Amino acid sequence: MIHPSRLAALALMLTAAPAAAATIEVTIDKLVFSPATVEAKVGDTIEWVNKDVIAHTATVKGGWEVMIPPKKAASLTLKAAGAVDYFCRFHPNMKGHVNVAP
Amino acid sequence: MFTRYTAGLAALLFVSAAPFAQAADKPTDPQIAHIAYTAGVLDIEAAKLAIKTSKNKEVIAFAKDMERDHEAVNKQALDLVKKLKVKPEDNATSQALSKAAEEERAKLAKLKGAAFDKAYIENEVAYHKQVNGALETLLIPSASNAELKSLLETGLKIFQGHEQHAEHVAGMLK
Ligand SMILES: [Cu+2]
């Protein structure tokens, strides 16, 4: 049996702790990233779900790249704060944007 | 009949397709399916030649992307025509495309090294421009089946991506 005061303290700790890292889903359908812009924070994971029959990438020039096979999902955990534009290396007409808060 | 084919052909063979397409009679869905499928096959054949011939990492990677994407799209097209019970119908536009591609391949087959890479990629830019122009101005507006139209529209987006990708690789070869 936990003492009520301990329980209160625990509850306080939980609420005071930073929000848990989230997984944010971006769908790819007919060569469109949606949502096109994602608001995230360091530690969050973006998961791209590819509904197309062709492979795509999420590529940041001079930065990270995620390969997203056809009819599959792939993810990336954001490690640095900042705003980045990304695109598909195979189909550069596909564009997305991620804002990463610290 | 002859005018229709000539106009369709013109749309595919010239980069500025719009004036020709405006004058064109509509190709039928079985003809459109055949033209779109043929255009894909021809790019796959060019890609295979490039994978075999080129020594350039970027060019080979690009060719593999073309092979993979066009095979995926053509598989979709085959599944769709089967589902719709449409029999793709050979036509003068498909034949003219094939003939032009054959001539291009014969030209490419004589080249090696950087000259091959440059010619292949420049042709990829031009070819995707032509096919995209024809899709936009002739094939998509002429398609009467909604699913066929939708597949062509997705195809157009994919091939517009290829065009940009090819332009990027062409820029790197300079
Ligand atoms: Cu892509």
Image: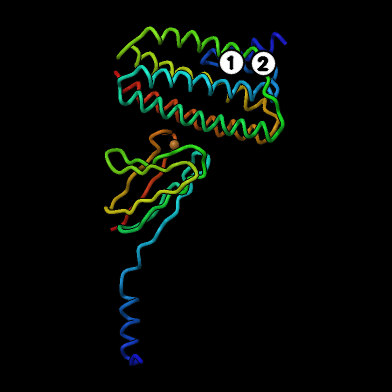
Q: Residue at x 62, y 27 (%)?
A: B140
Q: In the displayed structure, does residue B167 sit left or right of residue B23?
A: left
The relative height of residue A26 versus residue B96 in the rendered view (above or below) is: below
Tell which of A42 and A74 is nearer to you: A74
Q: Amino acid at mark 1?
A: Ala
Mark 2 residue CB less than 8 A from any atom of ligand 1: no
The relative height of residue B143 versus residue A18 in the rendered view (above or below) is: above
Q: Is residue A34 visible?
A: no
Residue most toward the front?
A: B52
Labelled pair 2, 1 in contact (Cβ < 8 Å): yes
Residue A4 place in picture, x, y as percent: 35, 92
Are there few (<14), some (14-19), or many (20+) residues within 10 Å of tag 1?
many
Task: Name the quadrant containing residue A69.
Answer: top left
Chain letter for mark 1: B
Which numbered circle lies on residue B24? 2
Residue B133 place in picture, x, y as percent: 54, 21
Q: Amino acid at mark 2?
A: Ala
